[in-house]
Amino acid sequence: MSEVPTVTLDAVPNPLPERLPVIDVREQHEWDAGHIEGARHLPMSQLVERLDEVPEGQVLVTCKVGGRSAQVVAYLVQQGHDVVNLDGGMLEWEAAGRPMVSEDGQPPRVV
């Protein structure tokens, strides 16, 4: 497998530029518990059938720790997309105190 384009959290601007789309590939319960505001939820299990929902231009891809998102980035690169994996995923994001929102009525958290 070729090298997966990856970025560490300290290289990601805070706050995120509005023009930088984010895809979160975690499952529904993980997304509901906490995610980056403005991110697009595109679970890894639905990626192939929802490929047309991947935005044009550079996209940041995240999951809980960076494993699933690395697999998704490798696949999307093969499809010609300009994507980069967030190393450490949402656990790093949360640990750094970056802003998150939730969908389940609880304070945002990573599960």
Image (tube, rainbow, N blue to C red):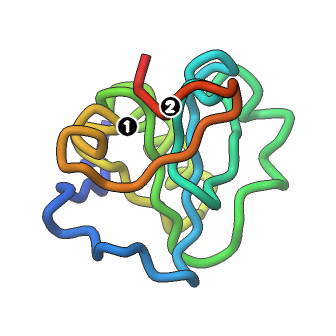
Viewer-proximal residue among 81 and 38: 38
Viewer-proximal residue among 47 and 90: 90
Q: Position of residue 111 (x, y in %)?
A: 43, 16
Q: Are marks 2 and 1 in contact (CB under 8 Å)?
A: no
Q: CA distance from mark 2 to mark 1?
A: 27 Å
Residue for point 32% across, 49% down: 86
Type of residue at label 1? Ala
Q: Is residue 14 left or right of residue 16?
A: left
Instruction: Say if 51 sits above or below 25 in the image.
Output: below
Q: Is residue 80 left or right of residue 54?
A: left
Residue for point 58% across, 34% down: 25
Residue for point 29% across, 40% down: 94
Q: Position of residue 68 (x, y in %)?
A: 43, 26
Q: Which residue is mark 1?
A: 70
Sequence-earlier tag: 2 or 1: 1
Q: Position of residue 46 (x, y in %)?
A: 76, 27
